[in-house]
Amino acid sequence: MVRGLFTAASGMNVQQNRLDEIANNLANVDLNGYKKDTAIQKAFPEMLIRRMNDDGVYRFPFGSVDTAPIVGTVGTGVETNEVYTNFTQGAMKQTENDFDAALEGRGFLTVQTPQGERLTRNGAFLVNSDGYLVTKSGDFVLGETGPIKLKKNNFVIDEDGTVWQNSTFAADDKRLVSQSENQWENIERVDRLKLVDVKRERYLQKQGNSYWKTTDESGDAQIIGADARPKVRQGFLEGANVNAVQEMVEMIEVNRAYDANQKTIQTEDALIGKLWNEVVRV
């Protein structure tokens, strides 16, 4: 009976971890570039149940106890194996704001933080007082040659991620320029967004604010080659890949599973109390 207490308690711990991840997903449903987390469970090894003697008297069979017939198995509990991040594409939201950029495809933008370079899918940018393109947290957006500095606000970003600037552009000109500099007069190539990827993205470490940090398991961030670069969509933002309705349904499921494990513990406690108060006393 004591085994039932530990099994049910492990189930409650797992459901608590699941609930934490669901709550975090719902809290970030409106955060641009957020990727949902899922808690993955793993069962402890099951134990074999063997029939010894019908009269209840235990006798070792000839040779080994392993010769007793197997009746079935019994579970020994469950644990949280890992928290898995789902990197599927989020929905594109058109903002018509030139400072917004979204990636369509696999890859990450790179920003410079006080703790070092970080990866992000959140393309809500601003221009600071020094003319640098920054995130809303004030971190520099990196190009392939360093932080991107703009002379004016009238810039465009083409699908390859190249940042172009021309003093003859009107502030409300939404045209994406060609990569050919000879097609427009006075056009200036500022830089190209540093779009990177890692070998095993599932092992990236979340840093908050839609930032990720590379780890030894994920591998170092490498600039994506021209044939695999994601498309950059200026004037768009990538929404979180969280389905709020699905998360609410899973929250109800978790609450019911937690309640079932709780009732199991209460039942086991009542049985132990009856054993000590009635059976042992006799």
Image (cartoon, rainbow, N blue to C red):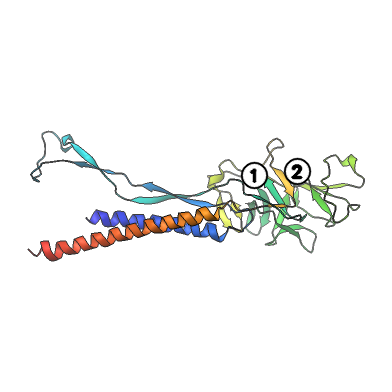
Q: Horizontal and vertical percent for residue 145?
A: 75, 48
Q: Earlier in the sequence, mark 2 or mark 1?
A: 1
Considering the numbered disc 1 on the image, is that residue within a helix, a strand or a loop? loop
Q: 257 or 200: nearer the eye?
A: 257
Mark 1 and mark 2 in contact (Cβ < 8 Å)? no
Q: Is residue 270 left or right of residue 35?
A: left
Question: Quick one: quadrant of the C terminus?
Answer: bottom left
Residue 107, label in figure: 1
Q: Amino acid at mark 2?
A: Glu
Tell me if mark 1 has few (under 14), some (14-19) or many (20+) residues whose alpha carbon lies within 10 angstroms of its own. many
Residue 17 visible in the current orientation:
no
Q: Is residue 185 left or right of residue 58?
A: right
- Looking at the rendered structure, the number of numbered marks drawn on it comes to 2
Viewer-nearest of discs 2 and 1:
2
Residue 96 visible in the current orientation:
yes
Considering the numbered disc 2 on the image, is that residue within a helix, a strand or a loop? loop
Residue 205, label in figure: none
Q: List the residue tagged with mark 2.
A: 159
Q: 40 or 257: nearer the eye?
A: 257
Q: Amino acid at mark 1?
A: Gly
Residue at x-position 56% and y-position 54%: 206
Question: Quick one: quadrant of the N terminus?
Answer: bottom left
Q: Horizontal and vertical percent for residue 231?
A: 71, 43
Q: 135 or 248: nearer the eye?
A: 248
Tell me if mark 2 has few (under 14), some (14-19) or many (20+) residues whose alpha carbon lies within 10 angstroms of its own. some
Q: Horizontal and vertical percent for residue 42?
A: 39, 47
Q: Is residue 88 left or right of residue 66?
A: right
Residue at x-position 91% and y-position 47%: 186
